[in-house]
Image (cartoon, helix red, strand yellow):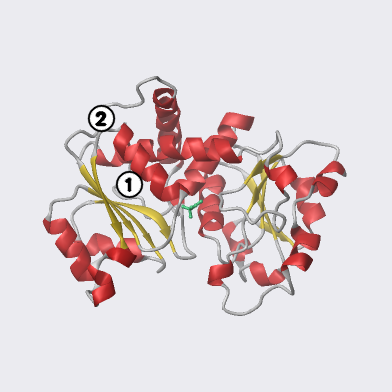
Amino acid sequence: MNLSIKHLFGLQGVPKDDITAILDTAFSFREVLERPVKKVPTLQGKTIVNLFFEPSTRTRISFELAEKRLSADTVNFSASTSSLSKGESLKDTIQNLFAMKMDVVVMRHSVPGAVKLLAQFVDAVIINAGDGTHEHPTQALLDMMSLKEKVGDLEDLNVAIIGDIRHSRVALSNIYGLKTMGANIMLCGPPTFIPYGVESLGVSVTYDLDEALVFADTVNVLRIQKERQDIGQIPSLREYRRLYGLTRERLNKLKKQITILHPGPINRQVEIDSEVADSEHSIILHQVLNGVAIRMAILYLLASGK
Ligand code: CP
């Protein structure tokens, strides 16, 4: 199975056939993850470097696990313990790393587009593990896999993405990916969290959470990104919870069940109550498991032929 893309910078412009191939391959790898011996020799002899310039728990561990499950050799790089802290430039750091013959680089960086810049310096497969407020394609792919597993077809599924859309790379990748797969998307949050002109991406917008919940078959709840807010964009977390928090009381008013996703990390009792995050309608921990399978699929499809 070949993809039309050579790198995974984001989901903007990635064709439906590629997304379908990635999801189908990930479902095959899910079966490997259920075996007593959870390892295949698929990427034996390949070397992968994980470059994380921003903190991560789920994405970093899940890429590392996926690489080990595929029998690749892996190297982990953390900006805080590297020579970057002695003033070395990003370009020099990366060129030195690649003089050591890496086949694949997985990179998280705070600057939107940093992954594309990297592709100009190195001859390796590049996978975006989150670039600033831009894209987080593997998160959107694992969200789509989890939804497919729960509800079946994504075509005409009504998905509400709720919260801090403006600062969220998860939102943008989900919009691109889900639109390509035929889903309908409504964004919901306070006006300060909704980017100007976002309707041009083919989504609808509401500032009213109850309206979004009436529309939705499923909701993807995003965290408030406290680290990316230079000025106060909401009056208080208490006010935010009152207007936009996914609470049991709000869901009880609906005459239907809604599937709940959250990419993590969760601000419990702010954007979502613990009782809802841990309920039977939440698939948050399935998302984490599927994250390993999705990353195995991407690594296999992009790296095995290189
Ligand atoms: N969902 C996600 O990207 O989580 P981490 O920041 O922990 O990787």
- The answer to whether residue 251 is above or below residue 146 is below
| Residue that sits furthest to the bottom in the current view | 231
Q: Which image quadrant for residue 223? A: bottom right
- Can you see residue 169? yes
Q: Residue at x 26, y 71 (%)?
A: 84
The amino acid type of the residue labelled 1 equals Ile
Q: Left of 56 or right of it: where is 91?
A: left
Q: Quadrant of the C terminus?
A: top left
- The answer to whether residue 139 is above or below residue 52 is above
Residue nearer the viewer, 96 or 130: 96
Residue 86, image x, y percentages: 24, 75
User: Mark 1 and mark 2 in contact (Cβ < 8 Å)?
Assistant: no
Mark seen at residue 42: 2
- Can you see residue 2? no
The amino acid type of the residue labelled 2 equals Thr
Q: Which residue is mark 1?
A: 5
Q: Which image quadrant for residue 275? A: top right
- The answer to whether residue 222 is above or below residue 233 is above
Q: Residue at x 51, y 59 (%)?
A: 169
State the separation of the CA atoms marked 2 and 1.
20 Å
| The residue carrying mark 1 has its beta carbon less than 8 Å from ligand 1 | no
Q: Left of 66 or right of it: where is 169?
A: right
Q: Quadrant of the N terminus?
A: top left
**Mark 2 neighbour density, 10 Å: few (under 14) some (14–19) many (20 or more):** some
Question: Element under label 1?
Answer: loop
Residue 171, image x, y percentages: 56, 56
Q: Left of 96 or right of it: where is 294?
A: right
Residue nearer the viewer, 279 or 153: 279
Residue 11, image x, y percentages: 44, 51
Q: Which image quadrant for residue 305? A: top left
